[in-house]
Image (cartoon, rainbow, N blue to C red):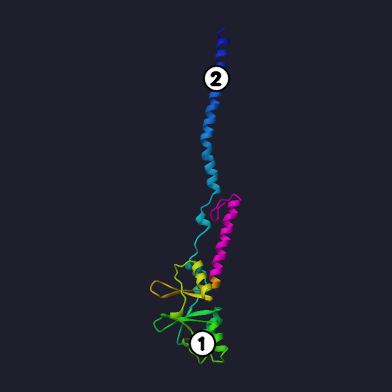
């Protein structure tokens, strides 16, 4: 008799406890759901600044062919020496400097073609300072300028090279239009990689898996 009563009571307790346990589980599940969603979302999100970054002139300069060579030449050298420099390094412009090393202008392939070759002059008998673009009329950039600003300067003045000057007016680099284009293309490829990784669920950061 006591055994039957005990069994009956246990069954009633089990029936009462089951709904309570289910309600408790539902509460815990609903509380954890936002956290799980947040974690999932966090894995699939990416920082906007990692996709779009302002490219600076210094970024383009680091990958410029001019960084590997001496891009200056004395204004008292001959035009022929400048042409030799163009040919040796496969470049189209160099910065001209005075005896103290201060910038006085630039000389480019265009200067040679328009002011020497077309006029029938001898490049070996003509000094660079006779045909170079003088510093007073020179368009320059700062290492702090953005690549977009540098491009705007080049397009606005129809030029292909920009000397980089620091705050003291000293020449610290040289950029060509090719350098700027390569920098932009490299950044675009990086952006495409980030967005592709994000779309494939790899995350939005560089090299994420």
* Sooner in the amino-acid sequence: mark 2 or mark 1: 2
How far apart, in angstroms, are the residues tagged by discs 2 and 1?
A: 101 Å
Q: Residue at x 52, y 39 (%)?
A: 34
Q: Which range of residues does the magenta coloring cover?
A: 180-209
Identify the residue position indicated by label 2 in the image.
16
Could you tell me what secondary structure mostly forms the magenta stretch? helix
The residue carrying pointer 2 sits among few (fewer than 14), some (14 to 19) or many (20 or more) residues within 10 Å by Cα, namely: few
Residue 176 visible = no
Q: Residue at x 56, y 10 (%)?
A: 5
Q: Is residue 202 magenta?
A: yes
Circle on res. 79:
1
Q: Left or right? Give the position of 182 relative to 129.
A: right
To which quarter of the image does residue 26 belong?
top right
* Residue 72 horizontal/vertical position (percent): 47, 80
**SS at mark 1 in the image:** helix
Image quadrant where one finds the N terminus: top right
């Amino acid at each position: 008799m006591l055994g039957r009563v005990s069994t009956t009571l246990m069954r009633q307790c089990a029936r009462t406890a089951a709904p309570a346990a289910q309600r408790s589980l539902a509460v815990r599940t609903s509380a954890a759901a936002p956290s799980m969603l947040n974690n999932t979302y966090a894995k699939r999100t990416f920082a906007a600044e990692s996709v779009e970054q302002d490219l600076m002139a210094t970024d383009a300069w680091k990958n410029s062919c001019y960084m590997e060579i001496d891009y200056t030449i004395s204004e008292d050298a001959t035009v022929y020496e400048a042409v030799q420099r163009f040919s040796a390094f496969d470049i189209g412009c160099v910065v001209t400097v005075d005896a103290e090393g201060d910038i006085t202008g630039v000389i480019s392939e265009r200067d040679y073609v328009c002011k020497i070759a077309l006029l029938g002059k001898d490049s070996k008998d003509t000094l660079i300072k006779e045909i170079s673009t003088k510093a007073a009329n020179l368009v320059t950039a700062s290492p702090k300028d953005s690549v977009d600003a540098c491009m705007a300067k080049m397009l606005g003045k129809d030029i292909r090279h920009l000397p980089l000057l620091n705050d003291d007016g000293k020449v610290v680099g040289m950029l060509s239009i090719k350098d700027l284009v390569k920098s932009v293309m490299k950044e675009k490829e990086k952006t495409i990689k980030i967005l592709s990784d994000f779309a494939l669920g790899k995350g939005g950061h560089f090299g994420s898996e």
